[in-house]
C-alpha cells in the first residue's frame, strides 16, 4: 500500500468532515439565527443558534464510543467509511430543510437533530483519521504522518467559510437568504462520494491487522479502555481543555466577536481567520516533523505556555485595528495553536495500546471537545455583561490553559519509537 494514498485518504476525509462541521458554524451567524431561531432580541437569537452549534460538540463523545467500538473491533477503514456517510448525509439534508417560517418548530428541531448526527460522525472521524496515518507510519516519521490529518481543520474551515462567502457575493441578499446558503451544504454530497472512493481503495492499518491476526480483539472496547487505560483518557481530556477553548474562539467565535463586539466588517474578520489558517498549513507539517526529534511533549508544553502568555495581549491587540487582528490571528492561531495541534493526534494516540487505541484516543479528545463546544454560549453572555474585556476573556482562557499544563506534568513522555515510558517499561 502506497503511503501517499493512505495520507491522502486520511486528509481528504478529514477536510470534508471539517468542511461540513465548520460550514454549519459559519451559517449559524449568517442565516440560522433569522431563519430557524427568529426573536425580537438579536442576542437571544444568536444564543439559541449557538446552542445548536454546541449540540454538535456535545454529540461527539457518542460518536467516539460508537465508532471507537467499530474501529477497534472491525477495523479503522470500516469506521471511517461510516463517518463520511453520516456527516455527508446530514449536511445534504440541512441543505433542503424547511425554515421556521415554513413549518414552525419542526424546522429548528430537524436542524438540531441533523447537527447531532454531524457531531456523532465527527466524533468518530478524527481519531480514525489520525490512526489511519500514524499506524502506517514507520519509526521516525510518526509525528509528521500524524500531523497530516490535522491539516483538514484549517482547510475545511476556510473551504466552508469561503463557500458561503462566494455564494453570498454571487447572489442578492434576498436570494442568499431564500436559497443561496443551501448550495454549499448540498455540495458536500459530491465531495463525500469522492472521499469514500479514495478510502475504499486502501487496506486496513498494519497495527489493527496484527491485532486481528492474533485474535486479541477487545470484546467491548469502551469497557476495556476504562478498566485499564482510564488515566490516559483523563489525561487526554485535561490536555485538550486548555487549547480547546482558545481553538473554538479563534476559529469560530472570532467572526461573531470581531463583527458584533469590535465593529469589524465580516470581510476583515474572515480575512484574518483565513490568513491564520493559511499559516497553519505551514506550521502543522513542520512541527509534526520536528516532534519526532525533539519530542511531542516538549512542543506541547511550550505551546501551552506561549498561549498562556499571549491570552490577554491577544484580546487587547485585536481591538486596536484590523492590522493587529491579522497579526494576532497569525501568531496565536497559525503559529502557536498550530504547533500544539500538530502534535496532538500523535501524542494522544501514543498513550493507548492498539487494542483500544481508536476508542481511547477518540473518547478523551471528544469529551474535551464537548466541554469546550459550549464556549460560544458562555462568551455571548460574557460579552453582553462585560463587553469585549481583554481581562475577562483572556483570564477565562488562561484558567483552561493552567489546567492543561497541570495535566502535562502527569503525562508520560513518549519515545521516538512511539510508546510512552510507562508502556515501554510495563
Image (cartoon, helix red, strand yellow):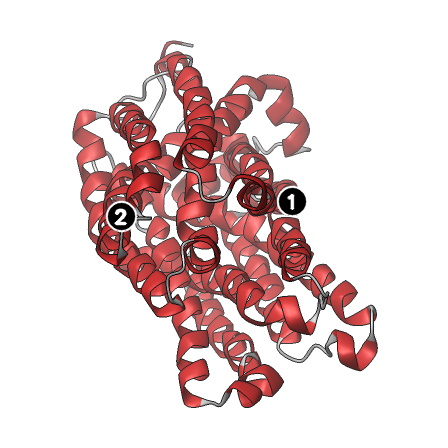
- Is residue 393 left or right of 39 when viewed as pictured? left
Disc 1, SS: helix
- Is residue 200 left or right of 146 when viewed as pictured? right
Task: Give the quarter of the image for residue 290.
Answer: top left
Residue 119: % across, % down: 61, 53
Residue 353: % across, % down: 47, 27
Q: Which image quadrant: the C terminus?
A: top left
* Viewer-closest of 138 and 387: 387
Residue 61: % across, % down: 63, 41
Disc 2, SS: helix
Residue 280: % across, % down: 26, 51
Pointers 1 and 2 in contact (C-beta within 8 Å): no
* Residue 1, visible in the rendered structure: no
Q: Which image quadrant: the N terminus?
A: bottom left
| Label 2 sits on residue | 334
| Residue shown at 29% from the left, 33% from the top | 310
| Residue shown at 47% from the left, 46% from the top | 248
The residue mark sitting in front, 1 or 2, is: 2
| Residue shown at 57% from the left, 57% from the top | 83
- Is residue 370 left or right of 243 when viewed as pictured? right
* Viewer-closest of 344 and 23: 23
Task: Give the quarter of the image for residue 221.
Answer: top right
Q: In the rendered view, would you say 293 is above or below 231? A: below
Residue at the far top: name it: 425
Q: Which mark is residue 58?
A: 1
Amino acid at each position: 500500500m502506497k503511503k501517499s494514498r493512505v495520507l491522502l485518504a486520511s486528509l481528504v476525509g478529514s477536510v470534508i468532515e471539517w468542511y461540513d462541521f465548520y460550514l454549519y458554524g459559519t451559517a449559524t451567524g449568517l442565516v440560522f439565527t433569522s431563519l430557524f431561531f427568529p426573536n425580537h432580541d438579536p442576542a437571544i437569537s444568536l444564543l439559541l443558534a449557538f446552542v445548536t452549534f454546541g449540540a454538535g460538540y456535545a454529540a461527539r463523545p457518542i460518536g467516539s464510543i460508537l465508532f471507537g467500538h467499530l474501529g477497534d473491533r472491525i477495523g479503522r477503514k470500516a469506521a471511517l467509511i461510516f463517518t463520511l456517510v453520516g456527516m455527508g448525509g446530514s449536511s445534504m439534508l440541512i441543505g433542503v430543510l424547511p425554515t421556521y417560517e415554513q413549518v414552525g418548530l419542526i424546522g429548528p428541531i430537524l436542524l438540531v437533530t441533523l447537527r447531532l448526527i454531524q457531531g456523532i460522525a465527527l466524533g468518530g472521524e478524527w481519531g480514525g483519521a489520525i490512526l489511519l496515518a500514524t499506524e502506517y507510519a514507520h519509526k521516525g516519521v510518526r509525528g509528521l504522518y500524524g500531523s497530516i490529518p490535522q491539516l483538514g481543520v484549517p482547510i475545511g474551515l476556510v473551504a466552508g467559510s469561503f463557500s458561503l462567502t462566494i455564494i453570498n457575493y454571487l447572489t442578492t441578499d434576498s436570494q442568499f437568504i431564500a436559497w443561496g446558503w443551501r448550495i454549499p451544504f448540498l455540495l458536500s454530497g459530491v465531495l463525500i462520494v469522492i472521499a469514500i472512493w479514495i478510502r475504499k481503495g486502501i487496506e486496513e492499518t498494519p497495527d489493527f491487522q496484527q491485532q486481528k491476526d492474533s485474535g486479541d480483539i477487545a470484546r467491548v472496547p469502551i469497557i476495556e479502555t476504562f478498566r485499564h487505560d482510564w488515566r490516559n483518557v483523563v489525561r487526554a481530556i485535561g490536555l485538550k481543555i486548555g487549547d480547546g477553548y482558545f481553538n473554538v474562539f479563534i476559529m469560530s467565535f472570532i467572526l461573531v466577536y470581531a463583527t458584533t463586539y469590535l465593529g469589524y466588517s465580516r470581510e476583515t474578520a474572515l480575512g484574518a481567520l483565513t490568513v491564520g489558517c493559511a499559516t497553519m498549513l505551514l506550521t502543522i507539517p513542520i512541527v509534526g516533523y520536528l516532534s519526532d526529534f525533539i519530542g511531542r511533549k516538549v512542543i506541547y508544553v511550550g505551546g501551552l505556555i506561549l498561549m498562556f502568555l499571549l491570552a490577554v495581549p491577544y484580546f487587547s491587540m485585536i481591538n486596536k485595528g484590523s492590522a493587529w487582528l491579522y497579526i494576532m490571528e497569525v501568531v496565536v492561531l497559525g503559529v502557536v495553536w498550530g504547533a500544539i495541534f500538530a502534535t496532538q493526534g500523535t501524542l494522544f494516540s501514543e498513550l493507548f495500546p492498539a487494542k483500544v487505541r481508536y476508542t481511547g484516543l477518540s473518547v478523551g479528545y471528544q469529551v474535551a471537545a464537548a466541554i469546550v463546544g459550549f464556549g460560544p454560549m458562555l462568551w455571548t453572555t460574557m460579552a453582553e455583561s462585560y463587553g469585549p474585556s481583554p481581562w475577562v476573556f483572556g483570564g477565562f482562557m488562561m484558567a483552561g490553559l493552567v489546567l492543561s499544563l497541570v495535566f502535562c506534568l502527569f503525562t508520560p513522555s513518549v519515545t521516538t519509537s512511539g510508546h510512552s515510558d510507562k508502556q515501554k517499561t510495563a
